[in-house]
């Protein structure tokens, strides 16, 4: 008989990524896995295909999945978001209480990596943004804790930079 006290934790999974497409695909997978929080750090999100109809629908579905779901985006430069991401800005207007876009400052301005963290247990990271190599890690709270600390340091050295009322589209 099945013991309800024993909850089987999924095994951690790691997948090396060698192309930017694999990184974008890993982002889609993480959005699908996320139940409560998504944290994205990137230079400007231009390489994430974040304004595509498919990513828009994935992010929208994530935000609609729960009233407490949160999406945090930290970037070095907001120009690409402001000028080339009308779908992302539409999400920001629709979910302004649960979606936040910040721009780095101070020490965070020199960060060269990029990462996406979902629910403190799944993440994808490229150690050097200019390089396509990266790693997707799923079901690993221990490894993800370090990525959460990394994102928190960046977030703490950033400021709100794009609001729901941003114009210029």
Image (tube, helix red, strand yellow):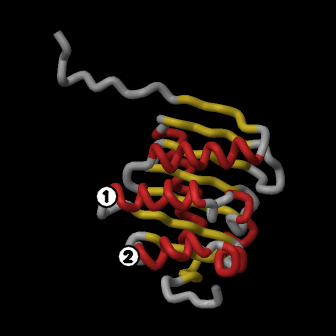
Q: Indicate the position of residue 140 as horizontal and vertical percent values.
A: 49, 36
Q: Which residue is more in the foreground, 43 or 146?
A: 43
Q: Indicate the position of residue 79 as horizontal and vertical percent values.
A: 71, 79
Q: Is residue 24 above or below residue 161?
A: above
Image quarter (top left, top right, bottom left or bottom right) of the N terminus: top left
User: Which numbered disc, 1 or 2, marks the residue that appears first in the sequence?
Assistant: 1
Residue topped by disc 2: 97
Instruction: Quadrant for residue 51, please give it.
Output: bottom right
Q: Residue at x 41, y 73 (%)?
A: 95
Residue topped by disc 1: 66
Q: Is residue 107 visible?
A: no
**Label 1 residue SS:** loop
Q: Which residue is more in the foreground, 57 or 143?
A: 57
Q: Residue at x 71, y 75 (%)?
A: 80
* Residue 97 left/right relative to 92: left
| Mark sitting on residue 166 | none
In the image as oriented, which residue stretches furthest toward the right? 130
Instruction: Quadrant for residue 60, please give it.
Output: bottom left
């Amino acid at each position: 008989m099945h013991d309800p006290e024993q909850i089987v934790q999924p095994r951690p999974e790691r997948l090396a990524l060698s192309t930017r497409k694999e990184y974008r695909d890993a982002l889609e997978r993480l959005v699908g896995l996320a139940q409560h929080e998504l944290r994205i750090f990137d230079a400007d999100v231009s390489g994430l295909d974040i304004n595509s109809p498919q990513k828009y629908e994935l992010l929208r579905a994530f935000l609609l999945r729960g009233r407490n779901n949160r999406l945090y985006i930290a970037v070095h430069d907001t120009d690409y978001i402001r000028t080339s991401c009308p779908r992302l800005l539409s999400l920001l207007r629709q979910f302004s209480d649960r979606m936040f876009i910040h721009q780095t400052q101070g020490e965070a301005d020199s960060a060269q990596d990029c990462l996406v963290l979902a629910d403190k247990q799944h993440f994808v990271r490229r150690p050097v943004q200019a390089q396509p190599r990266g790693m997707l890690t799923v079901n690993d709270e221990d490894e993800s804790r370090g990525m959460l600390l990394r994102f928190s340091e960046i977030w703490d050295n950033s400021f709100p930079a794009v609001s729901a009322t941003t114009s210029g589209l």
